[in-house]
Image (cartoon, helix red, strand yellow):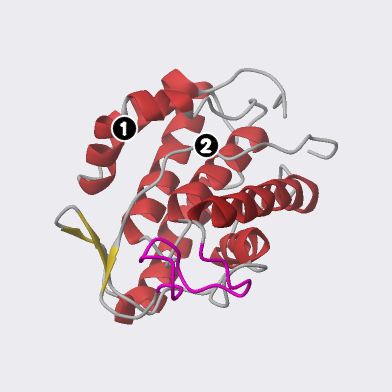
Amino acid sequence: MEGKKKRHPDTISTKYHASVAAEYEPGSQDLVLKNLLGITSKEKIDEAEVKGYAEAFEYMITHISSDQRLKVADIMTIHKVFFGHIYAWAGKPRTVNLSKDGFTFPAAQFLDQTLQHFEEDILKPNTPCHGARKEVIEKIAKVHLELLFIHPFREGNGRTARLLATLMALQAGYGGFDWEIFERRFADYVRAIQQLDLGLMSALLDTALRDGPDPG
């Protein structure tokens, strides 16, 4: 899986409500989370995150093999490479409770236990990701759904989950996903996550799966 080119992040994004106040950078009008760079501009923080995404993608394809069984620690490392130059909490489970559009993600106080179950019950039986197309899609859908439902990080859950889905597709010999399809069917994507709808998520992933080596 070496020699891949860097990719730019997809644009699917979310706006969360957190249980802890004063989490935003002063002067950012609550648009930018507190960060190590002192950035207050949404445009500048987006640029920093694009750079981090490319670095995380490069790390992922050069350090994780096609035969590697994935662990929660691997996901934490990918997130750390992605956001470590921006946020102090990069690569660590969130310590705040998050909600979006009335939907509340699992409580922060239970994340350690939740992630242990995720590793044992979801990551272990579904990685490394090999098999026929239908089996591969179902494995990726299970991991993707559960990780997004858990939402282990303060920020970057969706992008980290999509990096992981891409990695699993690469392990199976496919070329990643066309995430623009998820932009066009965003309501279905959110519904699949909130309802843990494996059938719907599998259908979305199957439509977006790219054949052959990842084009970069």
Q: Which residue is drawn at 51% across and 43% down?
A: 162
Q: Does the magenta stretch include residue 28?
A: yes
Judge whether 168 appears above or below 31 on screen. above
Kindly state the secondary structure of the residue where label 1 is placed.
helix
* Closer to the camera in the image, 105 or 114: 105
Spatial separation of the CA atoms under disc 2 and disc 1? 12 Å
Would you say residue 117 is visible in this rendering? yes
Q: Does the magenta stretch include residue 167?
A: no
Q: In which quarter of the image is residue 212?
A: top right
Q: Which residue is drawn at 35% across and 23% down?
A: 184
Specify the amino acid type for callout 2.
Answer: Asp
Q: Residue at x 73, y 52 (%)?
A: 55
- x, y percent for residue 175: 64, 26
Q: Which circle marks residue 10 in the picture?
A: 2
- x, y percent for residue 2: 83, 40
- x, y percent for residue 164: 56, 47
Q: Residue furthest left?
A: 102
- x, y percent for residue 45: 56, 57
The magenta stretch is: 24-40
Judge whether 102 appears above or below 189 on screen. below
Q: In which quarter of the image is residue 153?
A: bottom left
Image quarter in which the C terminus is found: top right
Kindly state the secondary structure of the residue where label 2 is placed.
loop
Judge whether 35 appears above or below 12 on screen. below
Image quarter in which the N terminus is found: top right
Specify the amino acid type for callout 1.
Answer: Phe
Nearer-N-terminus badge (2/1): 2
Determine whether, in the image, residue 173 is placed left or right of residue 189: right
Q: Quadrant of residue 84?
A: bottom right
The residue wearing badge 1 is 186
Q: Which residue is drawn at 52% across and 37% down?
A: 10
Would you say residue 199 is visible in this rendering? no
